[in-house]
Amino acid sequence: MTHFLHTADWQIGRVYGQFDTDDAAVLAEARLETVARIAALAHERRVDAVLVAGDVFDTQAVSDRSIRRLFDALAAYTGPWVMIAGNHDAALADSVWSRARQLGCVPPNVHIPDTTQVVVLDTLCVLAAPLTQRHTYDDVTATFDHLDSPAGLPRVGLAHGSVSGRLPESADAANPIDPERTTRARLDYLALGDWHGCLEIEARTWYAGTPEQDRFRGNEPGQVLDVVIGAPGQAPQVTRVPVGRFRWQQWQATLGLESDTEALAVRLAGLGADDVLRLELAGQVTLAGWERVQQAIGQAEARARSLSVDATALTVAPADADLAALQLDGYVADVADRLRAMQDGPDAAVARTALRLLLSFQRAQSREAA
């Protein structure tokens, strides 16, 4: 029996420019922490190997410190690791991998093939196809068809690219992989990277996905695959194992009734420290409804790791009583009326934002005067 973990797309050194500095640092650190959890899982389950299907690093320019920290994170599992270069960390003549070797930080149990070759381990043969350039339009796994391996050991392919015509969304045309590769190359399993979600292409061909979610896409990231092959020729048993920390979510909420606002508030109250949320608001609310939404968002921001809000499609339609309570008069009243009218025009997004800011400022001024 052969037992291994399949993982990919660690993207160590990724920069989260869309977040503020504190959140970006925590999200980047989480990627290293997840690698350490994978190592601990491999030790706990006594697997025969850990296969990493490319994009270990997010860029060739990752710092020396990050390279050292990555290899230190593997320490809990002393069995064999086989990792290949992907499109982000291609095995160029001068690459992050050559720097890792120069730094002397690659442990002896970590195999990093620079070219397509067979890595023979005690219980399996890994047919590894590292990318030697960022984009290729040839199928680097085609060589697998002609690679020999010792009899009696399962043949496991390890590659990084796009299975032609089989991904659920449009993908880059570069780095194609034949969907029939397992049959053509007599593979017992094909471990793939590049697609960041966990995905079964067919029983012997899987994408592990990134083990730490890194974008607002619900394609089942945050996992590694536990793979057992009873004997060469037998179908693999593949189990998804959650290892990621942060939950990235994207919500679209259309508000109209008061109950919509309260339902959103309840939902926001369920966020915790490991949530990363992008909230898109649309519809129409009264001034009181907008204040309720702001209150719920403010409370959620204090609990969540990150919360970003896009309210450009949300119209604030203050009732006459709202405006009377704010005691708008003179120029301010004229501006408010004009912005209310503009919310249905070509500059609607700007008008909605400006009206929300104006009313919020006026409300604060009224409270201070009270």
Image (tube, helix red, strand yellow):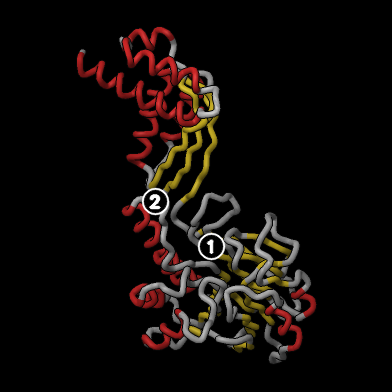
Instruction: Please give the residue where the numbered disc 1 appears in the rendered image.
Output: 210
Residue drawn at x 71%, y 70% as measured from the top left: 204
Q: Residues within 10 Å of mark 1 (few under 14, many from 20)?
A: many
Position above or below: 227 against 168: below
Quarter placement of the C terminus: top left
Which picture quadrant has residue 70? bottom left
Residue drawn at x 68%, y 62% as measured from the top left: 200
From the viewer's perspective, is 246 left or right of 49? left
Residue 58 at x, y percent in the picture: 47, 68
Instruction: Please give the residue where the numbered disc 2 appears in the rendered image.
Output: 19
Residue 192 at x, y percent in the picture: 63, 70
Q: Type of residue at label 2?
A: Phe
From the viewer's perspective, is 54 left or right of 296? right
Q: Type of residue at label 1?
A: Thr
Residue drawn at x 60%, y 75% as measured from the top left: 3
Which picture quadrant has residue 325? top left
Of 286 and 43, nearer the camera is 286
Residue 330 at x, y percent in the picture: 32, 11
Contact? badges 1 and 2 (CB < 8 Å): no
Q: Is residue 163 visible?
A: yes
